[in-house]
Image (cartoon, rainbow, N blue to C red):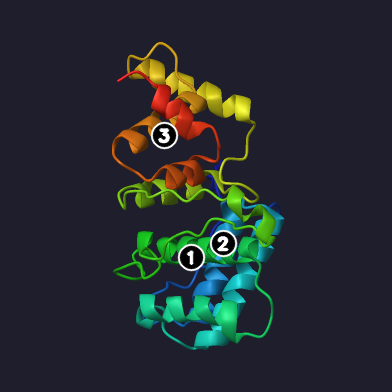
Amino acid sequence: MRVEQLPLFPQRGVKGEYATPLVETPELTSDSSLKSAVGEFRKHMKREGFTENTQKAFHSDLRLLMRYLGGSTSVGEVSTKQLQDFLEWLLDGRGVPCSPKSYARRVTTLKRFFAWLTETGVIAGDPAAPIPHQYVRYSNPRMRKKERKLALSPDLLPVLDRYLAQYQPQERLFECTDRNLEYVLDDAGKRAGIDHIAFEMLRWTCAVHDYRAGMDPEDVRQKHGNINVVSACRRSPG
């Protein structure tokens, strides 16, 4: 009696009783159009389990990019300057309001899309990598004193990009409670040999360092958001 070895997996191009046929995914190159790359990226998002809302939002953002650059533009031709011009167009040239939240998400969309093209070898360099992330600002002038602007090392940007790629935050950079963040910081401190540490301790330590380094007292107050911070720094032991 002849025994036939059945395949373990569906065969490409062959309809099976229990599975749909597998279709070859067209291979992208640097000469591929922006439109075809966006289509493949949407499939990638679905395979990777992006939420439905994220898929729709990212795809909508990339459709705006195609509208601005043209869907037939080769992905290998897209430059950092073109992406910067596109973001300026979103703010000032499109004629449609672009909220800080929408703008920040669109920067993330560009970074995720072109990072994927780079990681898969479609393009040699990532034109979106030099574009900085923008933090949300308050539109109400009365609330603008709550903004905190900190100078960060450029070395942090690749780490931030990896964090965004892994956790995909939607509303806030860290989508967890303050208490959870304190636990994370405390664990990091223990690994560094520090028995106990908290964000408030870091805040006050930074304020003291700024004051002792000669920062203007008003700048110290604005940076740290506490009217009593300067007097506290003056009372701190030398």
Horizontally, residue 229 falls left or right of residue 19, namely left
Q: Amino acid at mark 3?
A: Ala
Between 93 and 118, the one nearer to me in the picture: 93
Instruction: Please name which of the two marks, 1 or 2, marks the residue nearer to the observer.
Output: 2
Between 221 and 152, the one nearer to me in the picture: 221
Instruction: Locate residue 17: give its quadrant.
Output: bottom right
Can residue 208 be seen in the rendering of this structure?
Answer: yes
Instruction: Give how far apart the Cα atoms at labels 1 and 2 are.
Output: 14 Å
Helix, strand, or loop for circle 1?
helix
Instruction: Give how far apart the Cα atoms at labels 2 and 3 are.
Output: 28 Å
* Residue 196 pos. (x, y %): 44, 14
Q: Amino acid at mark 2?
A: Ala
Which quadrant is home to the N terminus?
top right
Instruction: Please name which of the two marks, 3 or 1, marks the residue nearer to the observer.
Output: 3
- Crowd class of label 1 (few under 14; some 14 to 19; many from 20; radius 10 Å): many
* Residue 204 pos. (x, y %): 45, 28
- Crowd class of label 3 (few under 14; some 14 to 19; many from 20; radius 10 Å): many
Residue, disc 3: 207
Going 50% across and 60% down the picture, which residue do you hit?
134
* Residue 69 pos. (x, y %): 50, 86
Which quadrant is home to the C terminus?
top left
Residue, disc 2: 104
Horizontally, residue 191 falls left or right of residue 166, namely left
Q: Amino acid at mark 1?
A: Phe
Residue, disc 1: 113
Tag 2–tag 3 contact (CB < 8 Å)? no
Quick one: label 1 or label 2, which is nearer the N terminus? 2
Helix, strand, or loop for circle 2?
helix
Going 36% across and 83% down the picture, which residue do you hit?
77
Between 115 and 213, the one nearer to me in the picture: 213
